Amino acid sequence: MLTSLLRRGLGLLGLAALAGSSAAPARTHQARPALWEVSDADTKIYLFGTIHLLPSDYQWRTPALNRALNSSQSLVVETIVDEKNPQPFLQAMARLGFSPGQPPIADRVPAAKRPLLDAAIRKTGQPRQAFDAMETWAAAFTLLSVQFKELGVSGADGVETVLKQEFNRNSRPIGQLEDIAEQLSIFDGLPEADQRAFLEGVIEDPKEMKKQFGGMLSSWVRGDVEGIARTFNQDLSSSPAMMDALIRRRNGNWAKWLENRLKSPGTVTVAVGAGHLAGKDSVISLLQREGLQVRRIQ
């Protein structure tokens, strides 16, 4: 179950923003993702559950979302990744993703899956020796970008990319909850067993990956928060370390940030992966437990 979460969940959890680009045909599929409002006397925060990687034919702008965005003085996302300047990402990967004494990459997957690993490595155009030097999570992350391209989804069509472009055009400030090094450190700190499960999941048949990603995408399109929560709870139940690192700690940090932000007047849109806004450990639930006014408006 963990492998499927890692493969399909990155698009909802915000850790694959540099997964490539795709063409942009006319948008045809209308989505109504979940949107909340958190407010007090002089502050309004819109919480928008996003998907970071999308096919290029999805339309997710709605009147309610447009009103929220147009009234916001600023935008806050999980992390600011500049696709035109990937140097900070590459530097973080070089610092965190390589360490001496790694076993050959082939030894980190079962023998039966080594042909799949070989095929995935060939698609990257990088030499095998480069993967031998990577930590397991970094090798998986590198291979995942190829898989996302085959799925026809990309960060270029993802929600955050579109929103950042809009706020930049209007010269409105954009902030982040984490930097890229903090996000990559989540994977760097995983137990090796979970890193290897990640690698195994990445090299599986893209057709199966597409099916699983499609199910998650369908829940997001409908604004089905309960469906998203069920998927993450089921998948992460097999990995307490992943649940704690990827969900609980980050959600707790973000809920505290939001509480502090309410102390300053103004209106802001906070756009984070929809997986963080679903379930009993979600940012929404944490804010409600603190007695804050949280209202779903879409």
Image (tube, rainbow, N blue to C red):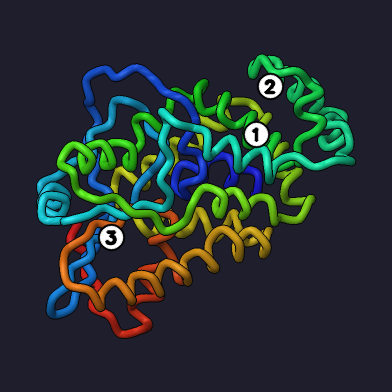
User: Residue 151 location in percent, x, y?
Assistant: 49, 25
Q: Which residue, given by chain and number where applicable, does mark 2 sit on?
A: 120
Q: Amino acid at mark 1?
A: Val
Front-most of 59 and 253?
253
Query: Circle 2 — which element?
Result: helix
Tally of numbered discs:
3
In the image: residue 269, left or right of residue 19: left
Q: Which residue, given by chain and number where applicable, does mark 1 sit on?
A: 202
User: Residue 162 location in percent, x, y?
Assistant: 28, 36
C-beta proximity under 8 Å, tags 2 and 1: yes
* Distance between mark 2 and mark 1 Cα atoms: 9 Å
Label 1 crowd bin: few (<14), some (14–19), many (20+), radius 10 Å: many
C-beta proximity under 8 Å, tags 3 and 1: no
User: Residue 90 location in percent, x, y?
Assistant: 58, 35
Q: Is residue 201 visible?
A: no
Front-most of 206 and 131?
131
* Distance between mark 2 and mark 3 Cα atoms: 37 Å
Q: Residue at x 26, y 17 (%)?
A: 25
C-beta proximity under 8 Å, tags 2 and 3: no
User: Residue 57 location in percent, x, y?
Assistant: 29, 26
Is 230 rendered above or below residue 214?
A: below
Mark before the other along the chain sequence, 2 or 3: 3
Label 2 crowd bin: few (<14), some (14–19), many (20+), radius 10 Å: some
Mark before the other along the chain sequence, 2 or 1: 2
Is 264 rendered above or below residue 128?
A: below
Q: Which residue, given by chain and number where applicable, does mark 3 sit on?
A: 47
Q: Amino acid at mark 3?
A: Leu
The answer to which quarter of the image holds residue 161 is: top left
Q: Residue at x 26, y 53 (%)?
A: 75
In the image: residue 220, left or right of residue 1: left
Q: Nearer the viewer, mark 3 or mark 1?
A: 3
